[in-house]
Every structure is written in C-alpha cells, then in structure tokens.
Image: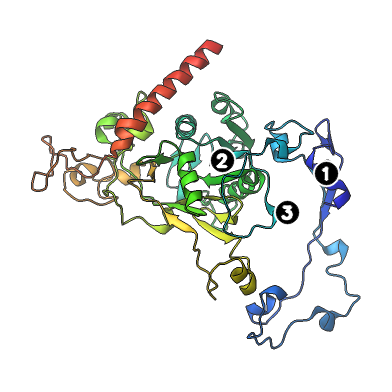
Amino acid sequence: IPEDWRDKVKLGDTVINDYSTLYVDIIPIRTPPRYTPPREFFQPKYRNSKMTLENLFLPDDEWGKDHILPKIDHSGRWENIPICMPSLMTHGLLPKGSDIRSHSLPDHTENHVAFPPDETPSVIHEVIACTWASTTFKTRSNRAQVGDGKRRLKEWLEFNLLSGFNHIYVYDNSGAFTNRDSLADVIDLFPPEQVTRIDWPCKICSNRDGNEGERSSQYAAESSCRMRFGAHARWLGSFDTDEYLVPMGKFGSMSEVAADLDRRRVRVAVFPSSPAKPRFDLIDDPEKTKQPDGTFIPTVKDDETFLHTYNCNWEQFPRTKTLTHRSKQMYRADYVKLHYVHYATVTVVSQMNEKETKDAGERWTHRYKESHMLEFDEENEATMLHSKSKVATKMRSWKERCTQTVLEESHCNVGFPFPKDYKDGQSKNRSDGWAYNCFLNDKIESYWWPKLVDAIKKREEITASLQ
C-alpha cells in the first residue's frame, strides 16, 4: 500500500458503506526454470564469503535490461482486489476510525530476541485460539462422515473461555458443503467480545482425488487467523474442537500459563497429543448405533460432556509415546512468522543471517534448530485432551479386544479406566470382564469437568432468559 494511503487504511476510511474505494492488482513474475544449486537463490543477506557461487543466474546477463517478465497479457494477473478495513474493524471488535494503539495492553514481557520496532503490532488480547470447524465433515481418507460439529463447538467454546482464552475465532467452513446451515446459531450464544465467527466457505483442494480429508481449507484458515488476528494477540494457538487445552498443576487458566512462559522466555510451547478413549460407562448403549457387521459408533450421551467422557488416556503421565506429527502448539504471535498445523516453520530468529543472529545474542548453527521451544510438563503446567471421535470401522472385534489387558492406543477403542486405588498385582479386569485400559486425569475429573458443567448450565439459563 502506498505510504500516503496507509493511515487511511488503518483507520478504515477507504471503506464506505461496506464498499472499498481502494483496489490492488497483483501481477506474478514468472521466469524460466533455473538449473543451478538451490543456495544460489538465497537473498544476498544470507550469502557469506564461504559460499562458492558458480554459474550464478544473473537476469541482466541472461535477458538484458529491457526484458518484461512476463508479458502483461500472459501474466495471470489478479485484478481489482479490494483493500478492506483492518480485520478487527471488519468484525466489530474495534470501531471504525479508532486508533488500535489506544486499546493496546501494556507489555509485561521483556523480549530477549530483537524485534524491529516497526514490526511489533498493538496487542489487545493476551491469549487467543483459532479453530476451523463445520456442521459436518469427513475424516481423513473419507473413512466416515461426522456430524456433531455444533455440539462439539458449543462445549469447546465454553471450556476454552472458562480455561482462560481471551478471545476465540471460529472459521466456519459449513458453507463449503451447504447454504442451509452454519455454526452461527452456536456462536451467537456467546458474547461477540469473546467469540468471532468468520464465514469461511473455502472448499478443500486435494491432488488426491476424492480425499476431502486433506485439509487445505483448514491450513489456509490457520494462516489467515495468524495474520489477521494473531497480529493483535500476545499468544496464539490453532486447535480442533476435539482438542481441550487444560491448565494443570498450580495454574488456573491458560493466561496464567502464557504469562509463566513469558517469564521463562519461551516462544513456542508444545502440547503432546494422543487420542483418548471414550469411557464405555458414559457413552450410549452400543445397541443404539449397532452396525450390520457387529461394530457400533461410540456416542457421547446427551447429558454428558466430551471432556468428561474422553477423560481416559491410554498412557499414564508423563506420556512418552506421543507423536510429533500429532502435537499442537501455542506460540508468541510476534515471534512465529509462519505456522503449519503442528510446526512453527518460520520464526524471527530463523529468518536472521549469521551476523544478525549473533548480534541478537542467539546461537548460530548452519542447520536451524528452534531454541525457544518448550514441551509442556503435562502434570504441572498444561496438557491437551484429544477427544477424537471413534468411528464404527475402529470398533471391529471390540467385544473380544476389550476383555484383553493390552495398553495400546487402538487395541480397544473404548475406555475402561483403572481405579484410583489400583495397585500392581491386582486383577486388570473388572468384575464384568472388561479390561482396564486407560487412566483418568484427576484435575479434569475433580476440577475442570464440574466447572464446565456449571458454566454450561449458566449459559443455558442466560439463553433461556433472553428468549
């Protein structure tokens, strides 16, 4: 955006009656293939005296000074893209024309990584969460259709607000499948200063035909949330509605957890993850959803919560068998410049060259390794309960498997928790024959679940009083 127009765009003055008066064209620059070593494409700041750059591609030598890349008619340009108001104004979180700096929170942290002053945005929230959700979706590889999106979102929003997230942004993907329903009626149950809905009907693109489970739309939503709203938050995390971020130990909220991370100069915090088991005693009677092949769909009872039903991890704390590609992260939004589902792929430090890294007091290595990352102590800091739905195909031979004393993730996909007073040497089978195969998180069971039930009840009373 030209410098003369930047203040007007910041204040929303270029949008009148919901119409933009400022547009931009994007013209891609396409060049022929270059058959040279990858390092020869480095920007000059990343090159050093030790690099031998043979056969360097020099456009002026190759094409001369008058070559146009490409011809305009063949450029594939995008024309007349409207410049909208800042996202906080577009979604009513700040009034049009207001200066966001007057709403900023004081910075209680001391950055040990040098952030250029002009790149440090105004922060209005301590901790935010983003999610991509839909009324219905298909699991990966199209194994099954799952239609509990509204119920899950309602509980997930309630818990995350209860556990200390200041604001939640819901990217509603329902419009990719239908124009008859959305998640708006669920989101409208919550105050707009706490939950914002972004209509996101972007369809999933996949180069694997028919595999709607590949989540390109979700990945784009995560990037959008980081850029549009993460810029005004201190900490950010993108999570699914079956993932519960639970403060543990002495912590009573995720805001307290984030403040502690700041004090310890952590910039990326990792939640280990492994799908929990729905407790057999808390799900509907298997006969209600029994399939012709003898399997069934484990379904949470109407008067139960997902948090309580799935409070049954197959591995005891501290867990060691979680997988990196399942873990999730919350991170400093001013530190992580690009995030991809499970990984902080570009950070402030990773963009620095050798001199900049050393000048900032950071350790320089040829192969970058993130040095400001911490994996949560799940007993004393925070944990993630992954309440992933179990579909019928996961329940083959369940009656036989669930009587066998095997502590594995997928051996028996419903949970039979060990009693709190269980001692080694005692029978690992219940009196009814089912085998113990998972462990309760006591803080969820005795603290967070009762608080969640109480919060849901209060929300229902408020909603009823407004009708």
Label 2 amino acid?
A: Glu
Label 1 amino acid?
A: Asp
Q: Which labelled disc corresponds to residue 126?
A: 2
Q: Disc 1 marks which residue?
A: 7
- First in sequence: mark 1 vs mark 3: 1
Q: Disc 3 marks which residue?
A: 118
Q: Is residue 359 left or right of residue 259?
A: right
- First in sequence: mark 2 vs mark 1: 1
- First in sequence: mark 2 vs mark 3: 3
Q: Is residue 118 above or below residue 356?
A: above
Q: Is residue 447 left or right of residue 254?
A: left
At x 71%, y 87%, the residue is 55
Residue 467 percent location from the top left of the image: 55, 11
Q: Is residue 12 above or below residue 425?
A: above
Spatial CA distance of label 2 from label 3 is: 20 Å
Residue 149 percent location from the top left of the image: 48, 34
Q: Say what secondary structure mark 3 lies in.
A: helix
Within 10 Å of disc 3 (Cα), the crowding (few <14, some 14-19, many 20+) is: few
Q: Is residue 60 visible?
A: yes
At x 50%, y 59%, the residue is 372
Q: Residue furthest right?
A: 66
- Using the image as rendered, state which of residue 113 and residue 135 is in the foreground: 113
> Given this view, does label 1 or label 3 mark the residue nearer the observer?
3
Q: Say what secondary structure mark 1 lies in.
A: helix
Q: Say what secondary structure mark 2 lies in.
A: strand
At x 55%, y 67%, the residue is 362
Colour mode? rainbow
- Using the image as rendered, state which of residue 187 and residue 259 is in the foreground: 259
